[in-house]
Structures are given as structure tokens and as C-alpha cells.
Image: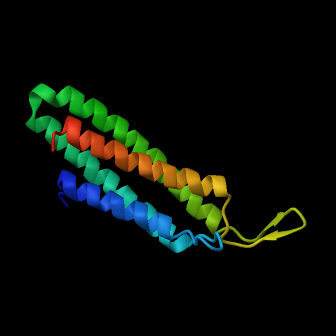
Amino acid sequence: MTHDATSLESDLRRIRTSVSGSIDKETGKVNQEEVNAQAEKLKEWIADFENLYIDRSRQRPREADEISHKGRELNEEAWHTYETLIDFGLVAGEPPAPVGYGMLPSGYVNPQTKSSVVTLLRDLLNNYIKFRKTTLKQ
């Protein structure tokens, strides 16, 4: 499926919003199924993004090196975010774990892990927007 730069931005926004929404703000519990679904969507996004920047570098031979270089950097960042999201989903699906004097119920994830996933997705989106505007000039 071919995506343009703007639709990829919209897709990434939806992924970020869905992952944030998968974290219950009151209880802190994480919806593992939603996280896993969004991880798969991010994997598809990465493939579409890779196709986009490779196609653009072919279309613009004078700017090909810059587009390829910055595209690869963003692609690596996206894969790191994907791997972190997969880990996040795995932790959310673990059985109850002992903590302190009791048990931490299944579906609960360390607050630092939650914030790092949200931060990675935010940074990926911001870096993609910057790439789209400055490198692709769209």
C-alpha cells in the first residue's frame, strides 16, 4: 500500500493516541491487546515509511543522499520504538508479580516504562514531522 507523507503522519498520530489511551489513567492498568495491535500497526508504518523515503530519494537524485541518510536514522528510531512497544506489551501481559508486601496484578507496568513508551512515540512523531517538512519539503 502506498502512503503519502501526510497520511503517514496521521497514521503515526493515531498509533500514539491509541497507545496513550491503552493506559488507564486512574488505575494504571495497560490494555495489552491494544498495545500489541498498535505495535503491529507501527511495524506496518515502518515498512510504508521505508518505501516512502526510498521512493523519494530515487525521485530526487540531487537530494538522495540526505533523504536516504535521514530516512535511515528515522527508520532506526522507529524500530527502537517498535521493540520498546513490544516489550511494553509483554510486560503488560505478564502474570501477577510480587512487589513489596503484596502482588502487583497482571496488566500493570512500571510508570517509568509507560512514560518512556509515550515519550518514544511522541519523539518519533515529532522527528517524522521535522523530516517531512525539512527533508521531504512537504
Comparing 134 with 59, the one in front is 134
Where is residue 98, by image quadrant? bottom right
Where is residue 15, by image quadrant? bottom left
Locate residue 126 relative to residue 80 in the image: left or right.
left
In this figure, which colouring scheme has been used for the structure?
A: rainbow
Q: In this view, does 122 lie above or below 55?
A: below
Residue at position x 41%, y 64% in the image: 17
Q: Is residue 74 above or below residue 116?
A: above
Residue 99 in the image: state x and y as whole percent. Answer: 83, 63
Residue 40 visible in the shown view: no
Residue 48 visible in the shown view: yes
Q: Is residue 30 above or below residue 130?
A: below
Residue at position x 22%, y 33% in the image: 67
Q: Quadrant of the C terminus?
A: top left
Residue at position x 29%, y 30% in the image: 69
Locate residue 117 relative to residue 43 in the image: left or right.
right
Locate residue 136 relative to residue 40 in the image: left or right.
left
Locate residue 59 relative to residue 90 in the image: left or right.
left
Comparing 23 with 87, the one in front is 23
Q: Give the residue at the far right of this rendering.
A: 101
Number of labels in the image equals: 0
Residue at position x 53%, y 54% in the image: 117
Residue 87 in the image: state x and y as whole percent. Answer: 58, 56
Q: Quadrant of the N terminus?
A: bottom left
Q: Give the residue at the far front of this rendering.
A: 26
Residue 52 in the image: state x and y as whole percent. Answer: 20, 47
Where is residue 65, by image quadrant? top left
